[in-house]
Image (cartoon, rainbow, N blue to C red):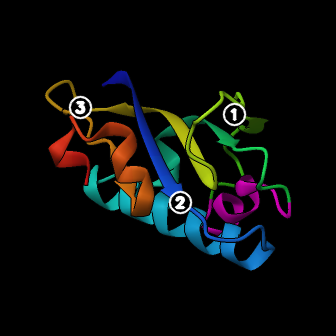
Amino acid sequence: MRLFALRGAVSVEENDAPQILEATATLMREIMERNALSPEDVVSCIFTATDDLNAEFPAVAARELGFGAVPLLCARELPVPGSMHGVIRVLIHYHGAEHHSPTHVYLGRATALRADLNAAQ
């Protein structure tokens, strides 16, 4: 086993707690499925949200999916002029088999953030 890190992002249309939780849960489920992971494999998760999303912590959705024992951190994304709004990002550190290849996941409008990662879509 070795330590890996992967990235993911999802777009949210409105600053609404249920939408933030639903989008984050969808992203986390997709990451876990595409990488054959369980919460027990995860070392930590760092979530960021753009300034326009403050109705709920994305980590709440992860806890509801079984990440209660995983250290989770929420932070603000840098408000770079012209950057995409309504985006939740995650950086996940996890243990996987030596031959594992991380699959990054970008959903919704966030696919434009990493169009170079065709497999991430």
Is 89 a magenta residue?
A: no
Which of the two labelled residues, at mark 3 and mark 1, occupies the earlier sequence position? 1
Which of the two labelled residues, at mark 2 and mark 1, occupies the earlier sequence position? 2
User: Left of 86 or right of it: where is 97?
Assistant: left
Assign a secondary structure to mark 1: loop
Residue beneath disc 2: 11
On the image, the x and y values in percent for residue 18 come to 73, 78
Seen from the viewer's position, the closer of residues 96 and 17 is 17
Name the outermost residue toward the front.
Answer: 82
Residue drawn at the location 35% of the way across and 47% of the way down: 112
Is 61 a magenta residue?
A: yes
Task: Sort mark 3 into few (<14), some (14-19) or many (20+) by Cα contacts within 10 Å.
Answer: few
Residue drawn at the location 13% of the way across and 28% of the way down: 99
Residue beneath disc 1: 77
Residue beneath disc 3: 97
Which mark is in front, 3 or 2? Answer: 2
Seen from the viewer's position, the closer of residues 77 and 40 is 77
Task: Name the amino acid type tagged 3.
Answer: Ala
Q: Which residues are magenta?
A: 55-66
